[in-house]
Amino acid sequence: MSGKPRLHYYNGRGRMETIRWLLAAAGVEFEESYLEKKEDLTKLQKDGSLLFQQVPMVEIDGMKLVQTRAIANYIATKYNLYGKDLKERALIDMYVEGMFDLNELLMKHGYLPANEKEQHFANMMDKTENRYFPVFEKVLKDHGKDFLVGNQLSRADIQLLEIILMAEEWKPDVLAKFPLLQSFKARISNIPTIKKFLQPGSQRKPLVREEEVPKVIKIFY
Amino acid sequence: MSTKPKLYYFAGRGKMESIRWLLAAAGVEFEEEFLETRDQYEKLLQDGSLLFQQVPMVEIDGMKMVQTRAILSYIAAKYNLYGKDLKERALIDMYVGGTDDLMGFILMFPFLSAEDKEKQRAIIVQKATSRYFPAYVKVLKDHGPDFLVGNNFSWADVHLLEAILMVEEKKADVLSGFPQLQAFKVRISSIPTIKKFLEPGSQRKPVPDDKYVETVRRVLRMYYDVKAN
């Protein structure tokens, strides 16, 4: 029996992608079981593996953890990516919760029907460029350090890189007004474990393709 | 200068109510500044008090904290309501995630049209009785019997009580198939700090009404139609 964490989700980003990023950044090998059809989800629900009948679910350290934040919090703490004390944790949580909000918008876009996409895109990029990125640019500017919190790598840096790359997929020049985020992106991408995760062949998942969307929807609805 | 936490929000439940519950359960006195006008909100925006331009915001220990989960986690950790180790913390996070999702179905309820309200009421009751309540019954059965985690009072218990009471407001007899949750409700409600919070005159806010909705719309200029999620 493997001691590696096992991720249960569909073969795509969704809400599991942040977890993949954290594990990869921490240098933790993990396995994945993919839901391909509704019956795969039903089976997990029936055998009591999903506390609230939902995925993501991660088998880790003898637990079947559900709820994205619970899983991410556990991994971040276990692998020292959550700051050194309660106050650093508070800052990390504030930043990361903002990132979760933006992540919801970015993640949803690929799954929307064509007639909703244009307005959603405008809202999504407005929030990215006017609400979220300016905050993180300012954090970096104000303390002048390499990492968002406490001058060491934390989940806040990893999750920020994740959403920067996701935003760039929709608007390649989205960092044009944010020079410090540009150098942040280069710096964090160069961290060996993260560099490896960004290379082809890693467990990082691609942006959902339009053709796949009906199949994913069928698993859950 | 007061060292009590100070809450900035509307004079109503919304996303701040879970924070009021947790502070009250921990026996922590707090002050509140209620947003009533657009000008108040714009002042907070202009003076840089709202990191992501949003409330809730809580001034606590020299920080202007935003993001409901961040604030709740900080309070839970500070007042020893977050379990004794990493694994208990994971369980608490999991359970709180569930009650957060359940209360999320109720959060937008006051903003819905009359027709959508009836549909949403049915969804709330269905989710509560078929998904969430059974999960917490099982947790109490397997790990309790008195509290959800570590057989010690934690944030998870406070949050579940809050959720139960909110669902009961939508359907008074919703706990009829769940005797263990009825007992849980009685037990947690009688904890002295919580009992006090449940009494008239506390800082607990009432069920949101049209005046609350109007205030939120006015302050946030949120005039679009709200649809249920």
Image: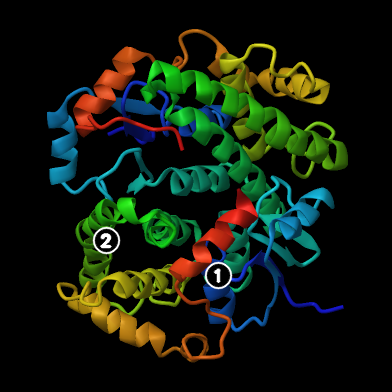
Q: Amino acid at mark 2?
A: Thr
At a point 39% along the width and 24% down the height, the residue shown is B112
Of badges 2 and 1, nearer the viewer stands: 1
Q: Is the residue B84 above or below the residue A84 in the image? A: above
Indicate the position of residue A177 as horizontal and vertical percent values: 15, 72
Viewer-side residue, A35 vs B7:
A35
Which quadrant of the view contains residue B192?
top right
User: Please, which chain is the residue tagged with disc 2 on?
Assistant: A
In the picture as drawn, the residue positioned furthest to the top comes out as B200
Q: Tag 1: Cα neighbours inside 10 Å, few (<14), some, or many (≥20)?
A: some
Residue located beneath label 1 in the image? A12
Q: Chain of mark 1?
A: A
Confirm whether circles 2 and 1 share one chain.
yes
Disc 2 element: helix
**Residue with the mark numbered 2:** A128
* Identity of the residue drawn at 42% across and 34% down: B15
* Horizontal arrangement in the rendering, residue A43 relative to residue A115 (left or right): right
Callout 1 secondary element: loop
Rendered location of residue B49, percent (x, y): 23, 45
Please report whichever mark, 2 or 1, sits nearer to the chain's N-terminal start: 1
Decide if residue B188 is on the left or right side of residue A146. right
Q: Is residue B30 visible?
A: yes
Amino acid of disc 1: Gly
Quadrant in which residue A100 is drawn: bottom left
- Badge 2: how crowded within 10 Å, few (<14), some, or many (20+)? many
- A124 left or right, relative to A158: left
- Estimate the x, y position of residue B133 in percent, counting from the top left: 72, 31
Q: Is residue B78 above or below residue A102?
A: above
